[in-house]
Amino acid sequence: MSRYNAKEFEAKWQKRWEDANCFAVQEEPGREKYYVLEMFPYPSGKIHMGHVRNYTIGDVIARYKRAKGFNVLHPMGWDAFGLPAENAAMRRGIHPARWTYDNIATMRGQLKLMGLSIDWDREIATCHPGYYAQQQKLFAAFMRAGLVYRRESEVNWDPVDHTVLANEQVIDGRGWRSGALIERRKLAQWFFSITSFSDELLDALDDLERWPEKVRLMQRNWIGRSEGATIRFEIIGRDDPLTVFTTRPDTLFGASFCALSPSHPLAAEIAAQNPDAQDFIDACNRLGTSEEAIEKAEKQGFDTGLTVRHPFRPDQTLPVYIANFVLMEYGSGAIFGCPAHDQRDLDFARKYGLPVIPVVLPEGEDAAAFTIGDEAYTGDGLAINSEFLDGLGVEAAKRTAIDRLAADGRGESTIQYRLRDWGISRQRYWGCPIPVVHCPTCGAVPVPDDQLPVVLPEDVTFDKPGNPLAHHPTWKHTRCPKCGGAAERDTDTMDTFVDSAWYFARFCSPRAEEPMTREAVDYWLPVDQYIGGVEHAILHLLYARFFTRALAKVGQVAVQEPFAGLFTQGMVCHETYKDQDGNWLYPEEIEKLADGTARRIEGQGPVTVGRSESMSKSKNNVVDPEAIIGTYGADTARWFMLSDSPPERDMEWTDAGVEGAWRFTQRLWRLVIENLDHMAAAGTPVPATLGGPTLDMRRAVHKTVQAFGDDIEKFRFNRAVARIHEIANTLSGFQPAKDDGRFVLREACELLVRLIGPMMPHLAEELWERLGYQDFLADQPWPEAEAALVADAQVVLAVQVNGKKRATVSLPMDAPEDQAQALALAEPAVQRAMDGKAARKVIVVKNRIVNVVV
RNA sequence: GCCCCUGUGGCGGAAUUGGUAGACGCGACAGACUCAAAAUCUGUUUCCCGCAAGGGAGUGCCUGUUCGAGUCAGGCCAGGGGCACCA
């Protein structure tokens, strides 16, 4: 029995593709392009199954589009800056660059084993000066365009490690590494003014039709547009007003207090005079920023003694508190509280004995009897206790209130966004240096383009806590580009999300001496199909969208959106096992038993078979792709990735599943190889005069060609795989009648091989060669189904009686309805079900169904 | 708390978008080949009643719309995801 030797043939075709530089592309004006991009990997060490799934999906699309005649750009690179490299440096004394480039070499080799149709000439790594120099130019360009600014911002400061931590690195108020209590500190940091595109970024989501609705929704929520009003309350005894944002100006008559964020400038001003206020603010700052801490935190306030005048009732004043639940980052950092119609305000009011005045009456309630208990009423209703607003619905009352505020000069309608500007300064070494020099006389001066790149010094040490760049003896000392005086470099590096916010553009002209050439980006952008995990649904994609708009603004690109199509793939999961103490066990440590339970191979104690979870080292449930490829070959791994589970859903990795895929790989091989002697010579056309089983076989194959292409276009790879199984089953049962059958057999095998090309490229190339062809299958055009063979001659209709299926009838395609009806009524099973009664009504849906109503 | 998604055999999942539920695969069972095993091939496999022909039930639960509902509407239940003191 002939066996497909995956190892041998995969190496053979990978070499041939590489020698022929098969997948390198250039701009070809006038030829339609297609840009396929998978999210580039972080070089963490080895590729994991998530990568295999991601790049398999991308490669299927790339190879399919290529066969469809597109000029396909399919590049690969490395998101190579980041903290793990520094951690490795600290733990093992390896330089981050060394660690990173070693990992890249390993992972590049692994990716090449997958047989991806990638233009490796365009490979980039964000940690290479050739890349980040261009990024520094973009930073400078954005600065000139007013899209970058510097301001003080609060950070989580670890006083032991002397470093800034991300929110995720703060656990229960302590640093994840040092365990030290985290302080909130103010640091001068650089920001990208992403909020200047808030409305554009929101509105453009509507036009991203080839994005998952889910992702668009998440972005909408993240941008978080709210319509409301700005209100200026007069502070008694002061000239400056207290500015407040609200979405509920209709509830102004229910206001019983105002509250400031502990970070509000007015709060600071008060605290300067009042030690108690300062204590309160300090207490608020000590409170953790973790979600848990926030959830549990009780509403607390400090009465400042200040009062403000109610904008509609000159005689009424409201107390002003500093409150722990008011955020400085949203709105103006101050609120008015209407306890009856906001839960937080209600909690606060109950605690401090403030009035609770209902001003919106729910439908069906009696105004005199309506009171608020423990729950604020946030629904619709008519205004009460609200003077000139009384009787109005919520929306009308909002408009009326805003009109009155505007007329009095005390406010106006305002749109607020939840989105905040993007702070990009990181006090880290392994990132793109921020190309700015701080001069005592000139201030922050961008490094001119001709002095870029600002290169990371290689001789750094990680033995001290804090930022190695700041510790470096000489690196930061420089001259001011403007005045030439002694100055210091900014020792911060950029958030690594900056690196990945424009790499798709760099791929268009990866070796250019400028960030990108217009010629290249105008041809290739936007990315036609972007593929990656949902975990990047918000930040990465939003940053890339922002960057593209910023690039357009500074004249680098013509497009406004980077990714015309987005596909988010699911995770690769695997069963988990734990011992009696809750420790995760490796699959190699256990043995599955027939009843679904498991036991330890060595040692004692029960094993709990847990649910399937995303592969992760900590859960001991990772399967190494290189081992799988070594055992079964890349094609089998790719095939399994595409089988069974729809690509957007999480899939479960099982040994049985890969083995099934492997068996099928072998089966396809035999199906073609063992038929080689029975088929017509290569290049002979199929005679037009066919009938019977040979015609049926042809019809089946051409239908598969048609349906398979549709499935790929729609990302329904699991369905496409099932169709290949079906046609393989049909072909296995096909007994080639001597003469015509030889032609049909050849046609069927050739089409089959061409269809699987994007999914199992090595197997397909080898079979293509065995079928007698010299040229790469990868260069062949996509097969087209013959329309006449796709259309059915006969159709089988279901016949229902009162909606229940009782029989089926076969009749010619598009047969008239009365023929279908007559045939249906003649069925014995139908007659039986009608039980002698006359049909009251017969519904005939052409080529579909007949339903007899009795 | 708010927003969103998903519930179909033992399992992953199909279902022409309102028209024959369970394609295809995995697993399981039976058989062929084999001294035997592996590999391969051929069957069976939603559940219940029945030897069978056949019949009944069935897409998380309940109501509804319809000649006809996995698909549409309303209300529940369960699981998952996103955001989260956003005024």
Image (cartoon, coloured by chain):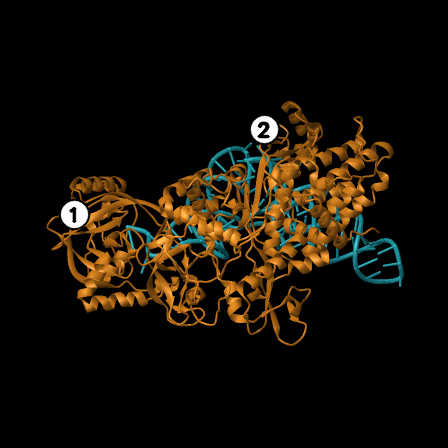
Q: Give A109 or A397, whichever is nearer the viewer.
A: A109
Which numbered disc, 2 or 1, marks the residue closer to the eye?
A: 1
Does A255 sit left or right of A122 as displayed? Answer: left
Tell me residue A365's x, y (percent): 25, 47
Tell me residue A123's x, y (percent): 59, 50
Q: Tell me the amino acid under the disc marked 2.
A: Ile
Tell me residue B46's x, y (percent): 65, 51
Residue found farthest to the bottom: A604
Q: Tell me the amino acid under the disc marked 1.
A: Pro
Q: Disc number at residue A311? A: 1
Tell me residue A312's x, y (percent): 15, 46
* Residue at x-position 66% and y-position 68%: A588
Please, what secondary structure does the residue beneath circle 1 have? loop
Tell me the shade of chain B: cyan
Local crowd size for mark 1, using a 10 Å CA cut-off: few (<14), some (14–19), many (≥20) = many
On screen, residue A495 above or below A797: below
Q: Give A20 or A655, whichever is nearer the viewer.
A: A20
Quadrant occupied by the C terminus of chain A: top right
* Residue at x-position 72% and y-position 56%: A632
Cα–Cα span, label 2 and label 1: 68 Å
For label 2, the residue is A843
Q: Give A605 or A7, whichever is nearer the viewer.
A: A7
Chain ID, mark 2: A
Tell me the shade of chain A: orange
